[in-house]
Image (cartoon, rainbow, N blue to C red):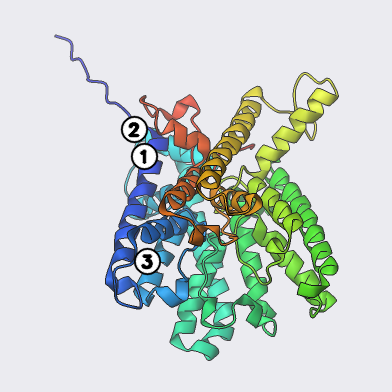
Amino acid sequence: MPIIKKKVKQPNPARTLTLSLLAVIAAGTVLLWLPISSKDGIWTDFIDCFFTAVSATTTTGITVVDTFNHWTIFGQAVLLAMTQIGGLGLVIILTFFNFAAGKKMGLMKTSAIAGEVSVSGIVGVKRLFIRIGTYTLIMEGVGALIMGFTLVPQYGGYGAFMAAFTSISAFCNGGLDLFSIGSGLSGYSSAPQVHAVIAALIFLGGIGFVVWDDIRNYFRTKRLTMHTKLVLIYSAALFFIGFLAYFIVTLVNQEQFGDMTITDKLFCSAFTSVSARSAGFNIKDIALVNDFSKITTTLLMFIGSAPASTGGGIRVTTLAILLATVEAVLKNYDDARLYGHSVSKRLVYKALSVLILSVGFCVICFTGIYLINPQIAEVDILYEVVSAFTTTGFSAGVSAAVDPASKLMLCLAMLAGRVGPVSLLLSLRNDKGDADKGKILPGCEILIG
């Protein structure tokens, strides 16, 4: 009698990752809600705890209560853990420790994970994730060590915690900081190494794990993949555009920036341009000076960083494919082309899907918040919504001022932005999670290798 094997239903990778993220948020919310987490020793408003947990886990960094003044060291440690998990990625962390413990994974699961970082094969995944874990620890450790030379003499043992907190938050493009203990980041003009380290960590976290590995292999192969070229070229171009726009703002607005030297204006403009694409750290409020700077920042936030990185946005590779598609239409090409190579229609469809769904999420959240809060300026609501969706963390003060319903809409925007709008919708589908069906996983809507 033939043996009939029951077909095992495979999990939906997008749903698994979304639920894992929600589990971290739920745990973080409960921990932040406890009196031990607040400095006044009372239960913090549950909605504020949930909003903060979502913001930390999605590496957004928008706050409704001050991170230093409200939370105890225990609460701050909870935020730090959620930022690290959300920034490095649940799949990456779990896979790294599974391999470190010598555990074996099924081929389907390994294939699904490979899809997240554009690598195929069990051996390739194992080696890459070990390197990712090693690189991350080294970069965050070095960043904390350098900042520690400034913060430890000033704050003692807490300065060491501040250095580690800031380093992890910057590398994960989280935007959370503890500098309200003093005069903020602007108080470190005499210690530019703090600003420089934060900017460097933001950049390294924002270009993505695949780019690190490709650059590492360049010295052996003498070649870079198309994905790495696009990330580096478009990141440089967006940095220059943002830097120029912010520098013009500092020159025109003498009332706000008249006391700054040209060198300070150049450095602050460069720092803001790096931070605006996903991190949310700020030395001076250049991004909030006027509507021009707000719109510029909104566009930079919406584009965001690279795939498979700790940043957000629609991704620079999505922008590259969309621009190549426009060029193909104008030049009457049959296919979009990037540096002499044809782009598959599947990638074009993905890019268009990401763009349309991202705009749709932002429009829905903007409309809902505006209808509830018509007294708030439209540009400020748009700024806040895009910052939430792209997990950037810049804020016009809207999140702290709106009602619970509006806060929940911003939470939805942060969650959708972190897992990706396509992945979020795929997680709701009632089908098998076969990785071979080309489903799009968090942080990797568009990858070209």
Residue beneath disc 1: 16
Callouts 1 and 2 close, C-beta under 8 Å: yes
Quadrant for residue 147, please give it.
bottom right
Q: Secondary structure at mark 1?
A: helix
Residue 446 visible to the viewer: no
Mark 1 and mark 3: Cα distance apart in space:
23 Å
**Left or right position of 449 against 240:** left
Residue beneath disc 2: 11
Q: Nearer the viewer, mark 1 or mark 3?
A: 3
Residue beneath disc 3: 78
Q: Residue at x 63, y 44 (%)?
A: 315
**Left or right position of 72 against 244:** left
Mark 3 and mark 2: Cα distance apart in space:
29 Å
Lower sequence index among marks 1 and 3: 1
Q: Residue at x 71, y 51 (%)?
A: 295
Q: Which residue is at the far front?
A: 375
Badge 3 local density, few (<14 within 10 Å), some, or many (20+)?
many
Vertical comparison of 124 with 380: above or below = above
Q: What amino acid does circle 2 point to? A: Pro
Q: Nearer the viewer, residue 34 or 11?
A: 34
Q: Residue 330 at x, y = what percent?
A: 84, 25
Figure quadrant of the C terminus? top right
Q: Residue 321 at x, y = what percent?
A: 70, 34
Q: Which residue is at the far left?
A: 1
Circle on res. 5:
none
Q: Nearer the viewer, residue 262 or 164?
A: 262
Q: What amino acid does circle 1 point to? A: Thr
Q: Secondary structure at mark 3?
A: helix
Q: Secondary structure at mark 2?
A: loop
Q: Which residue is at the far top?
A: 1
